[in-house]
Amino acid sequence: MKKIKILIADDHQLVAESLSLLLKSEEEFEIIGIVNNGWQALSFVEKYGADIVLTDYIMPLLNGVELAMRLKEQAREVKVIMLTMNEQADHIRESIQAGAHGYVMKSAEKAELVKAIKSVYRGGKYFSDKTLKKLAEIPNKNSISGKTKVEDVLSLTRREVEIVRLISEDLNNTEISERLNISPTTVETHRRNLMKKIGVNTVLGLVRWGLKHGVVKEL
């Protein structure tokens, strides 16, 4: 029987080791590594591969969202599941946009986590009931009810809004990365994703869009 190879990425060593012990009891699972930050996770996958990466949202160097984004850019076969205490709707939506295949709270029962891993490994997506409820609460000005549909995750995240505003101030990638405490590469990734999402090809087009939709104040 082919086992599902799982990499655990969590900067809390005790949590990571406990999770490893919990999942090792499943015959279908093989824990192939434990890493403590996003860069280690990225390096591990590049060297050894993995079927599933279980990652926390908040981690040093590269957080879970940035890790998912990098893996997606590299067209890696690996699937990413956020396993976190973070319940903020914006962060859930940002994770989905970055390419995460699942989002499960650390408070979940073992059965739910096992179900999530198996579902994602087989090509599906898994979001806990709590996650779906949080997504449904995100205000959407285009919705008559004032709520957003779960699948409607195309509006800008808080981080993307920040980047549009900083671009409008004529800051380059390095300057923006210093302001937001993220890497220049991550800024460039956000910039490309923004242009694709909005449907523009230039920075000027991005700024014009921001002005039109009230994201950027009049210059």
Image (cartoon, rainbow, N blue to C red):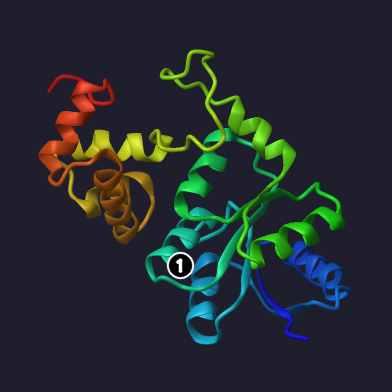
Horizontal and vertical percent for residue 176? 27, 47
Camera-side residue: 100 or 184? Answer: 100
In the image, residue 148 sits, relative to residue 57, either above or below, namely above
Camera-side residue: 179 or 82? Answer: 82
Horizontal and vertical percent for residue 196? 27, 47
Q: Which residue lies furthest to the right in this view?
A: 25
Camera-side residue: 182 or 33? Answer: 33
The crowding category of the residue bearing disc 1, from other C-alpha atoms within 10 Å (few below 14, some 14 to 19, many at least 20), is many
Q: How many labels does the image show?
A: 1
Write the residue at 28% across / 25% down: 215
In the image, residue 84 sits, relative to residue 70, either above or below, namely above
Write the residue at 14% across / 43% down: 203
- Residue 9 in sight from this viewpoint: no
- Residue 5 in sight from this viewpoint: yes
Write the residue at 72% across / 37% down: 130
Q: Is mark 1 on a helix, strand or loop?
A: helix
From the viewer's perspective, tell me whether residue 103 is left or right of residue 106: left
Write the residue at 18% across / 42% down: 200
In the image, residue 93 sits, relative to residue 75, either above or below, namely above
Horizontal and vertical percent for residue 108? 81, 48
From the viewer's perspective, tell me whether residue 30 is left or right of residue 175: right
Image quarter of residue 218: top left
In the image, residue 26 sits, relative to residue 98, either above or below, namely below
> At label 1, which amino acid type do we have?
Leu
* Quadrant in which the N terminus is drawn: bottom right
* Quadrant in which the C terminus is drawn: top left
Residue on which disc 1 sits: 71
From the viewer's perspective, tell me whether residue 122 is left or right of residue 149: right
Horizontal and vertical percent for residue 160? 35, 40
